[in-house]
């Protein structure tokens, strides 16, 4: 296995594996991975980190590679900011991390996702990105190039990811041996996001429950009890996902001893890291699922807009629906009550009877 093999898991980006392969032996201090959401920048960053730290240049299977996959490697950090944008004090924290010594690896890798939200914190990061200790490698990820990033990018190797088409995602699923009909459903329900499509294609139950989002526009009614029962079903599907993840987490915890031994770190250290990761996952899973659903719903109204000969009243209603859905998406991030939020949204969307 090599970096190229690891990149095989990211559709459409094999060209980049060739570009990065040349850096595995003697990596530079800072890289910028720029690509649209879900073009695989985080997966690629982890693949690159694996190749750099693995004795076998990225086998994908040794304890080091597995620990990176699970965010548990002591010398690979995926920095999670706490709020909507990176703060100056968080940027200082990252700078401090850069000057920490490694716990045994030849390098430490610091991955910072969503750098487009760097705001005023960019200048703080600049110093450590420009002149970090020789053993520190920054992998900075961004979905777009914003002006604040210009200087940071000029000090880094910039790797640009291409957006993926639905056809590429479909072909990717077919190549991995999935049934064409399942693949087609998964691509449609993923609203063009490949990691979601991968999740959906292997999970018929999730596909079935999730497709309720797609059917929603035809089921909406002025009758509030209809709306409430729809929202109950939508939230029930999310809870199911949450329960499933909890089960997987239990399994990960039970394998902790073995991994700690192989990585040469204490069980307590790894246990804390795993617990933190599990909590973070559970905090996010509900929002992530609901946003995926809202995105699909939004797609419905966007596709409507493309239909020819739509009367102006219907056009206005669709535009209004899109705006309502977008508002709900941002409200979700602010931790609103999800039940009330969905009831309010669905009762405002155009119903068949209206
Ligand atoms: Zn490995």
Image (spheres, rainbow, N blue to C red):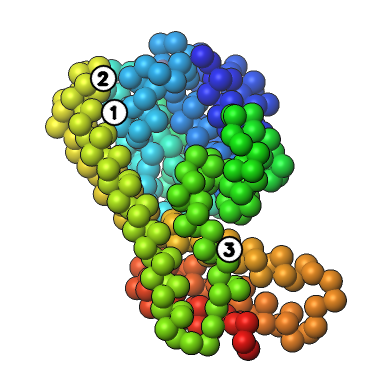
Say what secondary structure mark 1 lies in: loop
Looking at the picture, how far across and down is residue 174, in whole percent?
64, 33
Q: Nearer the viewer, residue 141 or 246?
A: 246
Q: Which mark is residue 74?
A: 1
| Residue at 30% in and 39% down | 248
Distance between the Cα atoms at labels 1 and 2? 8 Å
Q: Which mark is residue 214?
A: 3
Disc 1 + disc 2, Cβ < 8 Å: yes
From the viewer's perspective, is 108 left or right of 205? left
* Mark 3 or mark 2, whichever is nearer to me: 3
Residues at marks 3 and 2, CA–CA distance in whole angstroms:
45 Å
Displayed-image quarter of ligand 1: top left
Residue 11 sits above or below residue 150 on the image: above
Residue 272 horizontal side relative to residue 237, left or right: left
Specify which label sits upstream in the sequence, 1 or 2: 1
In the rendered picture of this protein, how many numbered marks are placed on residues? 3
Disc 2 secondary structure class: helix
Query: For the C terminus, which image quadrant?
Result: bottom right
Q: Nearer the viewer, residue 169 or 36?
A: 169
Figure check: 59 above or below 77: above
Other-residue count near label 3 (Cα within 10 Å), few / some / many at <14 / 14–19 / ≥20: some
Task: Report the disc number at residue 263.
Answer: 2
Q: Position of residue 305 (x, y in %)?
A: 74, 71
Q: What is the crowding at mark 1: few (fewer than 14 residues within 10 Å), some, or many (at least 20)? A: many
How many C-alpha atoms fall within 10 Å of the one at disc 2: few (<14), some, or many (≥20)?
some
Q: Residue at x 46, y 31 (%)?
A: 46
């Amino acid at each position: 296995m090599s970096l190229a093999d690891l990149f095989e898991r990211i559709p459409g980006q094999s060209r980049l594996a060739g570009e990065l392969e040349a850096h595995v032996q003697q990596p530079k201090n800072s890289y910028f991975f720029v690509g649209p959401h879900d073009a695989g920048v985080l997966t690629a960053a982890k693949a690159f980190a694996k190749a750099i730290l693995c004795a076998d240049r990225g086998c994908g299977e040794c304890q080091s590679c597995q620990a990176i996959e699970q965010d548990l490697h002591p010398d690979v950090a995926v920095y999670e900011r706490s709020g909507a944008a990176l703060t100056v004090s968080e940027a200082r924290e990252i700078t401090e991390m850069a000057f920490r010594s490694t716990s045994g690896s030849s390098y430490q890798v610091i991955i910072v996702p969503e750098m487009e939200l760097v705001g005023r914190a960019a200048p703080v990061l600049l110093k450590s990105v420009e002149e970090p200790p020789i053993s520190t490698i920054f992998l900075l990820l961004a979905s777009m190039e914003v002006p604040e990033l210009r200087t940071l990018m000029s000090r880094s190797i910039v790797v640009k990811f291409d957006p993926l088409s639905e056809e590429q995602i479909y072909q990717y699923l077919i190549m991995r041996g999935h049934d064409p009909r399942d693949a087609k459903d998964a691509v449609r329900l993923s609203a063009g996001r490949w990691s979601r499509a991968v999740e959906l294609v292997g999970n018929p139950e999730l596909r079935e429950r999730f497709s309720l989002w797609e059917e929603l526009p035809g089921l909406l009614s002025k009758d509030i009890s209809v709306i409430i029962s729809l929202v109950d079903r939508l939230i029930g599907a999310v809870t199911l996902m949450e329960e499933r993840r909890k089960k997987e987490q239990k399994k990960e915890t039970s394998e902790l001893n073995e991994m700690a031994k192989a990585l040469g770190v204490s069980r307590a250290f790894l246990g804390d890291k795993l617990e933190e990761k599990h909590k973070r996952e559970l905090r996010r899973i509900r929002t992530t699922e609901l946003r995926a659903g809202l995105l699909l719903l939004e797609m419905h109204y966007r596709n409507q807009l493309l239909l020819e000969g739509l009367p102006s009243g219907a056009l206005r209603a669709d535009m209004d629906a899109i705006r309502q859905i977008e508002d709900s998406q941002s409200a979700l991030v602010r931790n609103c009550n999800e039940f009330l939020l969905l009831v309010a949204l669905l009762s405002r969307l155009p119903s068949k009877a209206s």
